[in-house]
């Protein structure tokens, strides 16, 4: 019997839970990473040293491996161009994955809003518009403040700005200011700031059906770029679960999302559900690799492998069997006494960045992460 291979697009530490989960299915692993010392290479059967975004070179090298078997699935625990690269490879290899046109649209926040804006039934969106060099007066008059300006394809809270009035908006959009920031206006989306409680939703899509995994309350810094500080489970907004599921199902149908992980951010304001962002990627912030398995007793990566292999995933355990959990980020480096106190009272503590910028410019500028299980 010939071997079955699983393609791991990436071999860094974030990819390790996926590699380990695929191995439990008896699959042999092909890992792609440009770093020859990537930890994923040590536990893989075949390795390809290449940037995970160079999909044409990866496909060429896969064809030179002379595999005694077939590639039956794969995924990428990354974001942006890497996910688009996997979409290309999934089409070429005839394995499950989002088609490139669908992934391209999902990676563009403006395109997502435009696609679903005229067909909403279960949720709302902020007033929004694309960034451009010349904004018409009628468009300018429709802007609502405060407003958020952010990259159409950004992640990790990078280059997010809050604007409080039309004067500040005009100043920010000046050519000189954008050039100094190395930003083109066409790469931006401008949208009304929605106040209210923020939640993060984690789920899967299988055969065009959305499956809710968990909802957490998200706490961020009060000012842009809204650094993520905490995720709390279970959410105090669980009564929204059915509406959240309906909203995601509507997005899945309009965007034609087939088999994929999903993570999304929402605001609850005046009894209405507002979509902030949605992405077809593995959730970060220690949700997939800590909170979900530790607090819910659910193997996220086992289900992800099943999704990518076309196998039905397991049902969630009863919420009554779950444990409260808080993922908490430490922005500034604490003194030794504070650090030892946190270490002694938390269930998990990891250093993320020994020398973070302050004030932080993105989620990368956080010193450590800790977790507390109830």
Image (cartoon, grey):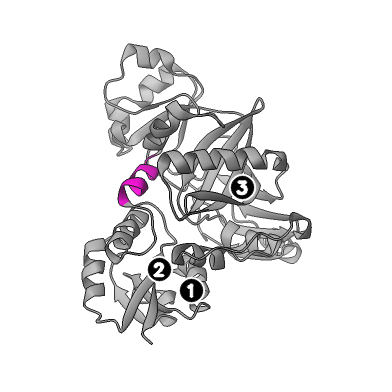
Q: How many marks on residues?
A: 3
| The image quarter in which residue 92 lies | bottom left
Name the residue beneath numbered marker 3. Answer: 229
Q: Which residues are magenta?
A: 100-108
The C terminus sits in image quarter: bottom right
Q: Is residue 363 above or below residue 349?
A: above
Residue 1: image location, x then y, percent: 38, 87
Q: Nearer the viewer, residue 301 or 128?
A: 301
Look at 29% across and 73% down and name the residue there. Answer: 49
Residue 73's label in the rendered image is 2
Check whether the beta carbons of the residues at disc 1 and disc 2 lie within 8 A of each other.
yes
Q: Nearer the viewer, residue 334 or 236?
A: 236
Indicate which disc, 1 or 2, sits on the residue closer to the N terminus: 1
Main SS, magenta region, reads: helix
Q: Marks 1/2: CA distance? A: 9 Å
Q: Which mark is residue 22?
A: 1
Residue 204 image point, x, y percent: 53, 54
Q: Residue at x 75, y 66 (%)?
A: 344
Residue 55 at what x, y percent from top left? 26, 62
Residue 213's mark?
A: none
């Amino acid at each position: 019997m010939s071997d079955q291979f699983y393609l791991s697009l990436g071999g860094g530490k974030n990819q390790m839970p996926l590699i380990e989960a695929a191995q439990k299915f008896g699959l042999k692993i092909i890992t792609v990473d440009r770093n020859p010392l990537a930890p994923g290479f040590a536990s893989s059967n075949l390795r390809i040293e290449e940037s995970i975004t160079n999909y044409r070179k990866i496909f060429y090298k896969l064809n030179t491996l002379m595999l005694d078997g077939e590639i039956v699935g794969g995924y990428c625990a990354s974001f942006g161009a890497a996910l688009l690269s996997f979409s290309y490879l999934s089409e070429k290899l005839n394995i499950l994955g989002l088609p490139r046109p669908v992934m391209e649209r999902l990676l563009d926040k403006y395109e997502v809003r435009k696609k679903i804006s005229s067909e909403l039934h279960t949720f709302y969106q902020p007033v929004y518009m694309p960034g451009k060099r010349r904004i018409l007066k009628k468009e300018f008059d429709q802007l609502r403040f405060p407003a958020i300006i952010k990259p159409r394809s950004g992640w990790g809270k990078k280059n997010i700005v809050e604007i409080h009035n039309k004067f500040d908006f005009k100043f920010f959009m000046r050519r000189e200011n954008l050039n100094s920031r190395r930003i083109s206006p066409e790469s931006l989306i401008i949208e009304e700031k929605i106040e209210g409680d923020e939640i993060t939703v984690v789920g899967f899509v299988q055969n065009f059906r959305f499956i809710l995994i968990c909802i957490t309350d998200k706490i961020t810094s009060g000012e842009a770029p809204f650094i993520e500080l905490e995720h709390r489970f279970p959410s105090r907004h669980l009564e929204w679960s059915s509406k959240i599921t309906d909203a995601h199902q509507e997005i899945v149908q309009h965007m034609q999302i087939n088999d994929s992980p999903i993570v999304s951010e929402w605001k609850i304001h005046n009894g209405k559900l507002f979509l902030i962002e949605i992405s077809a990627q593995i959730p970060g912030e220690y949700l997939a690799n800590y909170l979900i398995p530790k607090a819910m007793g659910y193997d996220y990566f086992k289900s992800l492998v099943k999704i990518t292999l076309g196998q039905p995933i397991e049902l969630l355990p009863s919420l009554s069997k779950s444990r409260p959990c808080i993922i908490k980020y430490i922005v500034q480096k604490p003194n030794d006494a504070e650090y030892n106190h946190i270490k002694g009272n938390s269930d998990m503590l990891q250093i993320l960045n020994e020398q973070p910028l302050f004030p932080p410019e993105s989620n990368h500028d956080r010193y450590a992460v800790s977790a507390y299980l109830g």
